[in-house]
Amino acid sequence: MLIKFQKPDPRAGQTVRMDSSRGQHFVDTGSAILVKEGAVTEVELAAPLVDGPSPAEQLVSATAAEVIAGLAAVTEVELARAALAAEQAEAGKKRKTVIEALAAHIVALEQPQG
């Protein structure tokens, strides 16, 4: 899916292609808008990403309750692992409930779907 970031996101103005679940997360939170395919120029697509928080860092930047509630939208185990690493790397913020919820979510994502 193609999205365009909006202010106050640090990537405001940039258009990027993302997997649909992650892109929809940014649209749902108001950080981006959905862009019709073909409505973006090649110059916009080739623009480098602005330095800023990674999707995982953004995920864990919310309150503990918001992070835990938002895990239902996280369908990629790599993103969940990166979010866990980002949470554990924050020296002053290590929230036990968030770490436990992320670890449990990773286990659930790794289970074979039946």
Image (cartoon, rainbow, N blue to C red):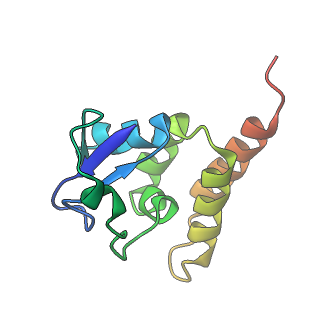
Where is 29 relative to 78, above or below?
above
The image position of residue 87, as x and y in percent, is 57, 67
- What number of labels is visible? 0
Residue in the image at 51% along x and 74% along y: 93
Query: From this viewpoint, which residue is outermost toward the top?
Result: 114
Q: Does the image show residue 22?
A: yes
Query: From this viewpoint, which residue is outermost toward the front?
Result: 42
Query: From this viewpoint, which residue is outermost toward the left?
Result: 7
Q: Nearer the viewer, residue 103 or 2?
A: 2
The image position of residue 35, as x and y in percent, is 24, 38
Residue 6 quadrant: bottom left
Residue in the image at 24% along x and 61% along y: 9
Direction from residue 59 to residue 16 in the image, left or right: left
Direction from residue 15 to residue 96 in the image, left or right: right
Residue in the image at 47% along x and 50% along y: 67
Which quadrant of the figure contains the C terminus?
A: top right
Query: From this viewpoint, which residue is outermost toward the bottom?
Result: 91
Direction from residue 19 to residue 7 in the image, left or right: left
Q: Does the image show residue 31?
A: no
Residue in the image at 55% along x and 41% along y: 74
Residue 23 quadrant: top left
The image position of residue 2, as x and y in percent, is 34, 41
Where is 109 relative to 61, above or below?
above
Which quadrant of the figure contains the N terminus?
A: top left
